[in-house]
Amino acid sequence: MEIKKAKFLKSSSDNKGCPTPDKPEFAFIGRSNVGKSSLINMLCNVKDLAKTSSKPGKTQLINHFIIDEKWYLVDLPGYGYAKTSKTNLEKFEALISNYVTKRKNLVCLFILIDSRLELQKIDAEFMEWCAEKEIPFAIAFTKIDKLGKNQWASNLAKFKKQLLTTWEEMPQYFETSAEKRIGNKDILNFIEENFQYFVPPPKATANDDI
């Protein structure tokens, strides 16, 4: 699959403000500064579609983008940004939790992981939480171009070893680089293959409890 048209649709502070769940939806989430906006821009081939920033915590709303008039790509707030207030942290956590567990048309959640680091506790806990809530997810390792081939292979092996101490098998994962455009085709083909799991809502209840 190749994206031909991508445009920003709207920002929402909760699920009720999100678009009607009448199209398959794929969301992206990760710790602040993991390279989420850059990855989204790379996938859509639009330089400034999702706003990038050197300041962590910039994304604070649920941002919907309409892709080829067929599906939604969603940019979610980053988690684990310690410098924001406790009130804001609780607000973001509630926003993410409600969206992930109640958004009926969410087909898959991409959890972004910085390839340069070992498995972080907050990432491991978030993946475990998704598994407990039966949320389909895939991992996208970001910034692999920042590492040499051998270093990345070593980091990936460590990540797998850590994860497999609690998981029966390694979740679906992708190796990506926004700068080198690595992983673009793999992720987009995965998204296209998973369109089949989208179940359109009944017309009479399309706008209920989204």
Image (spheres, rainbow, N blue to C red):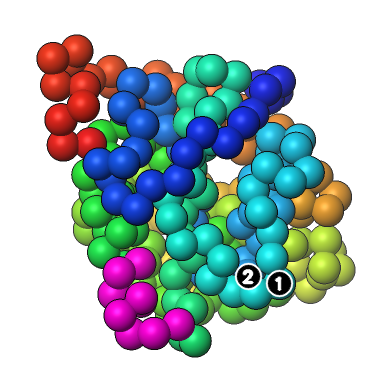
Quarter of the image where one finds residue 168: bottom left
Please indicate, yes or no, whether residue 171 appears anywhere in the rendered image. no
Say which residue appears at 68% left-offset and 42% top-offset: 49
**In the figure, 24 relative to 175: above or below?**
above
Give yes or no for residue 91 being in the magenta stretch.
yes
Q: Where is residue 28 in the image (x, y as percent from the top left)?
A: 51, 50
x and y percentages locating residue 66 in the rendered image: 53, 28
- Against 116, residue 24 (above or below) is above
Q: Nearer the viewer, mark 1 or mark 2?
A: 1
Residue visible at 34% across and 38% down? 18
Which residue, given by chain and number where applicable, does mark 1 sit on?
Answer: 54
Which residue matches tag 2?
Answer: 33
- Who's the residue at 76% across and 51% down the image? 178
**Which quadrant is home to the C terminus?**
top left
Residue kind at label 1, given as amino acid type: Ser
Task: Identify which residue is drawn at 56% across, 66% down.
Answer: 58
Q: Is mark 2 on a helix, strand or loop?
A: loop
In the rendered view, tell whether residue 50 sits above or below residue 149. above
User: Would you identify the image quadrant in which residue 37 lies?
Assistant: bottom right
As rendered, which of 105 and 157 lies closer to the eye?
105
Image location of residue 74, percent across then percent down: 48, 43
In contact (CB < 8 Å): disc 1 and disc 2: yes
User: Is the magenta region chiefly helix, strand or loop?
Assistant: helix
Residue neighbourhood size for the residue with mark 1, other residues' Cα within 10 Å, grouped as few (<14), some (14–19), many (≥20):
few
Q: Considering only order in the chain, which callout, 2 or 1, is on the residue closer to the N terminus?
A: 2
Q: How far apart are marks 1 and 2 (CA)?
A: 7 Å
Q: Nearer the viewer, residue 30 or 68?
A: 68
Magenta residues? Answer: 84-92
Q: Does the magenta stretch include residue 173?
A: no
Q: What element carries label 1?
A: loop
